[in-house]
Every structure is written in structure tokens, then in C-alpha cells.
Image (tube, grey):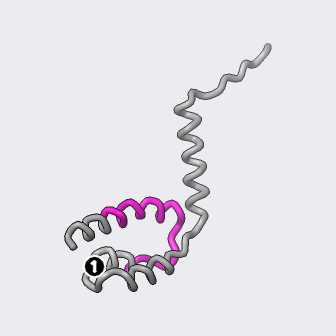
């Protein structure tokens, strides 16, 4: 009997690949101390983004950093519009 192996559909292969990449990103850490220093230097003391960044740990899993980056940029965009 011959076993025929078929590739999984593309959407299943991509989701598996994304899952594997996510696990790799969970193992890597990003040092955000330079970001905090920049925020302390450039943002006003009443800046929401500055407060949010200062409350974060100095090191974040890369996946968390990537996930939070979009939120941080949105806050920064809103603060720039009000200046």
C-alpha cells in the first residue's frame, strides 16, 4: 500500500507558521529602557504615553512589544493632534 502525503491547505500551513513564529517571539526579549529614556526626554510630564511607558517592565517578550507598539503609536498620534 502506498501512502500519499498531501500538503495541508495554504491557510493551515500559514497559521501553523504564524503560531511557530509567535512562540519564537515569546522567547525573545526586547529591552525598552532606551524607549523610556527617549519618552522621558521628549514627552511632557503630563503625557499619557510617557506614563504608560514608565509603568512597563524594562524588558518585554518580543511578541508583547510588537502587540503594544500599535497602541503606543495610537496614543502618540492622538497626543500630537492635541498639541
Give coordinates of residue 65: x percent, y percent.
Answer: 47, 65
- How many tags in the picture? 1
| Front-lying residue, 58 or 43 | 43
* Placement of 54 over or under 77, stated as above or below: below
Residue at image coords 25%, 65%: 78
| Front-lying residue, 1 or 43 | 43
Residue at mark 1? 47
Q: Quadrant of the N terminus?
A: top right
Q: Quadrant of residue 83?
A: bottom left
| Front-lying residue, 49 or 41 | 41
* Placement of 25 over or under 20, stated as above or below: below
Residue at image coords 50%, 80%: 33
Check the image and name the residue furthest to the top.
1
Magenta region, residue range: 55-74
From the viewer's perspective, tell me whether residue 76 is left or right of residue 6.
left
Give coordinates of residue 10: x percent, y percent.
Answer: 56, 30
Give coordinates of residue 5: x percent, y percent.
Answer: 71, 23
| Front-lying residue, 55 or 46 | 46
* Placement of 67 over or under 8, stated as above or below: below
* Placement of 72 over or under 10, stated as above or below: below
Q: What secondary structure characterizes most of the magenta part?
A: helix
Residue at image coords 59%, 35%: 13
Is residue 64 a member of the stretch shown in magenta? yes
From the viewer's perspective, tell me whether residue 13 is left or right of residue 34.
right
Is residue 28 a member of the stretch shown in magenta? no
Check the image and name the residue furthest to the left.
82
Give coordinates of residue 39: x percent, y percent.
Answer: 39, 79
Query: Around disc 1, counting alpha carbons within 10 Å, would you say few (fewer than 14), some (14 to 19), or many (20 or more)?
Result: some
From the viewer's perspective, tell me whether residue 50 is left or right of residue 36.
left
- Judged from the image, the secondary structure of the residue bearing numbered disc 1 is loop
Amino acid at each position: 500500500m502506498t501512502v500519499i502525503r498531501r500538503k495541508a491547505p495554504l491557510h493551515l500551513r500559514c497559521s501553523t507558521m504564524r503560531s511557530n513564529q509567535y512562540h519564537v517571539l515569546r522567547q525573545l526579549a526586547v529591552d525598552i529602557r532606551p524607549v523610556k529614556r527617549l519618552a522621558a526626554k521628549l514627552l511632557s510630564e503630563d503625557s499619557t504615553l510617557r506614563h504608560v511607558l514608565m509603568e512597563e517592565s524594562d524588558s518585554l517578550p518580543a511578541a508583547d512589544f510588537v502587540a503594544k507598539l500599535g497602541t503606543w503609536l495610537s496614543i502618540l498620534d492622538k497626543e500630537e493632534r492635541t498639541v
